[in-house]
Amino acid sequence: MADTKTDIIIVDDDEISGRLLKDLLRQAGYGTYRLRRPLDLLLAVRRRKPRLVIMDIVLRGVDGFKLLKTLRDNRETAKTRVIVISEKSFDFEKQQAFKYGAEAFISKPFNVETLAGQITHILDGNKFNLAALGGGMEEEEMSETECEPSDLKDNQVRTRVWGCRGLADSLANSESAWGRQTSCVSVETKDRLIILDGGTGIVPLGRKIAERGGPKDIWVFLTHFHIDHIMGLPNFPCLESSAFTLRIAGAGETEKRFKDAVRDIFYASPYWHNRHPRAKLLMYEIAEDSYDLAPDFRLSAMHANHPSPTLCYRLEIAGKKIVYAPDSGLVGDPYSMQAYDEKLGAFSRNADLLIHDSCFTDEEWRQRPGEGHSSPSTAMEFAALQAEAKNLLLFHHDGAYSDETINQMKTKAEELAKENRWSTICHAAKEGFSLTLD
């Protein structure tokens, strides 16, 4: 391979489109080099130092995105400008291309009359946006609607359950009185809405918000990135309107900043179809600390005893205290050498409402001690004796459990409280459950 400077390197192993690209660009006055072996791209860019690389992502024997990432990760080639031209032009592929540094994505079959002009436009220093080159990403302004007035008084806080189940190994065919949606809870005051977790329950919640016309500024607090707590987020209806602002907060992962982990949900996840959000997204990475978010709203976070970086939240809002710990493995033994139960007890002390993990039956909890979950009896005892909470909401029911099993779990916790004359009132979460704190 000669050390020759080239305007454009073409990486396309489709004989027809590869030749067509080369001819069109030569007619436009560009020096081109068509690379026959995609794996030689790094070497070719080093030697020829092109102004631009045009590449397909569907290539024989190599992943086009990995090839693009290799260019970006190499110090000598990191600043090389790249345009992706491909027949595989789903939103996911477009988003991945931009994630790995492509300046534009042009769908095949491309327009032979305008292609050279588009390339010149980019080489002259202009970037095309995704809608202009890829198509299908046009943004529509949704009409403004008046938000229905709240029925809450100034000092009232309403908590509602939109999803409370864990994700079973296989999906159930039967309906459940407790619901099948995964974790999502709303906390509402007269002029504020807060969402806890983005499981599938966030989808019906979003429909309700859209019907009401607001509120338009919403906080979403994610406890962690296990799939059942985020799988509803890409389809949250409020994302479709530019009138909404979503403030999404949570803990970062070990290898990713929180902002990047959330962006991957919307723009680059291989697990579901992505839709480009029209709402304004603001991301906040938080740690185990307290945050004054408004004059009457203070948020505190604490690390939960659960696999992966996971948070519990305490909301002090409108004079009420609500603690949300949906994935929290209580030890349940006051004589063991551990500090988690005691620390969470202090964090939850005198809560008006404690929403706590009760995923397993007492028997199964003893058989699965290392999974970071609790049982109704351990949660009930903790709420009454260590948290001294006014209300306990049993939450995160195992997705495989029958209604009969969950009924028995609730009854057992209630009987335990009654036998010991504990003042904490026990509730069990179900879709549509609502508790208003006065």
Image (cartoon, rainbow, N blue to C red):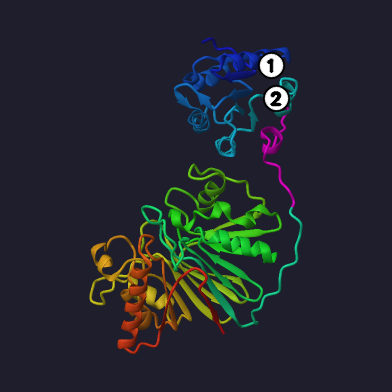
Residue 280 found in image quarter: bottom right
Region rendered in magenta: 123-141
Secondary structure state at the residue bearing disc 1? helix
Residue 119, numbered circle: 2
x then y, percent, for residue 199: 49, 59
Q: Which residue is mark 1?
A: 25
x then y, percent, for residue 58: 52, 26
Residue visible at 60% across and 81% down? 156
Quadrant into which the C terminus falls: bottom right
User: Number of callouts in the render?
Assistant: 2
Left or right: where 437 falls relative to 103: left
How would you classify the magenta stretch by its main secondary structure? loop
Instruction: Using the image, determine if residue 349 lies above or below residue 173.
Output: below
Q: Can residue 167 be seen at all in this image of the molecule?
A: yes
Q: Are marks 2 and 1 in contact (CB under 8 Å)?
A: yes
Instruction: Using the image, determine if residue 215 lies above or below residue 379.
Output: above
